[in-house]
Amino acid sequence: MIIIGERINGLFKNVRKAIQEKDPGPIQELAKKQVAAGAHYLDVNTGPAVDNPAEVMDWLVETVQEVVDVPLAIDAAKMEAIEAGLKVHKNGRPIINSTTAEPKMLEKALYLAGEYNALLIGLAMNEKGVPKDSDSRVAIAMEIIATADSCGFSPSDILIDPLILPVGVAQDHAPEVLETIRQMKLLADPPPKTVLGLSNVSQETKHRSLINRTFLVMAMAMGLDSVIMDANDQELMQALATARILLNQEIYAESYLEI
């Protein structure tokens, strides 16, 4: 299971303040804490409240890379900001987060992935929005995979995000997302990887950590490959480690919860 730490995101007040003040301290502390907790990648997102996202992304990526050597998921709404981060990325193979199946956006994302040897997160949505049922999600994922294949990408270069929505407003989507993850393993050889932005499932709910860790374990049982999550949520990390034992992905030892 690939863990992508979610905390360097301008949507969080402390990160937004650090970005506005160009203060590297809080950003670098978050980076070090997430890697120490077990994150394999760090998601880096300027957030929406910046006037110059490309310039901010350049600064964020360089700031993070000064203190950790894990690769980054470059996360932004605009491809110009993503490309700015890719240009200065130097630690391993980056992830582009993300593209929909909308043709122009997908074309640009695949170009950048090829130019910078990046993995690509493909969202199971198009210009019509997020579909409700798993069959529609899988069909959109296949469009992304087929287009990527025509551009010379292996399915294993693509991470499909089936897009979990908040359980408080879209409860009926949760089983459809789980079924989408299961079906993705049957689509190609090698199959595309899957990823979830886990915290979305618990937005605006009272028991966020409990909902997150329960859904994560369910998704892992369906074959989830990677997750964007709070690596510093100890109970969540323990649930992940325990699921790996019970799914026979890790050899049991009394010390398996020690990171």
Image (tube, rainbow, N blue to C red):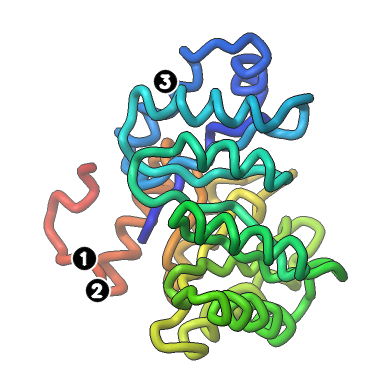
Q: Which of the two discs, 1 and 3, sits closer to the camera?
A: 3
How far apart in space, not on screen, are marks 3 and 2 (Cα)? 34 Å
Amino acid marked by disc 3: Glu
Label 1, label 2: how far apart the Cα atoms are? 5 Å
Q: Is residue 39 above or below residue 190?
A: above
**Quadrant for the N terminus in the image:** bottom left
Q: Which disc is residue 250 wearing?
A: 1
Q: Secondary structure at mark 2?
A: loop
Vertical comparison of 133 with 52: above or below: below
- Front-lying residue, 181 or 106: 106
- The residue most toward the right is 128
From the viewer's perspective, is residue 117 above or below residue 33? below
Mark 1: which secondary structure? loop
Compute the Cα span from label 1 to label 3.
30 Å
The image shows residue 222, relative to residue 82, as above or below, that is below
Q: Secondary structure at mark 3?
A: helix
- Dot 1: few (<14), some (14–19), or many (≥20) neighbours within 10 Å? few
Q: Find disc 2 in the rendering and name its residue.
A: 248
Give the image quarter of residue 100.
bottom right
Estimate the x, y position of residue 110 in percent, counting from the top left.
59, 63
Which mark is first along the chain, 2 or 3?
A: 3
In x, y percent, where is residue 152? 49, 76
Residue visible at 68% across and 47% down? 79
The residue under the point 55% across, 10% down is 23
Q: Quadrant of the C terminus?
A: top left
Q: Is residue 15 left or right of residue 124?
A: left
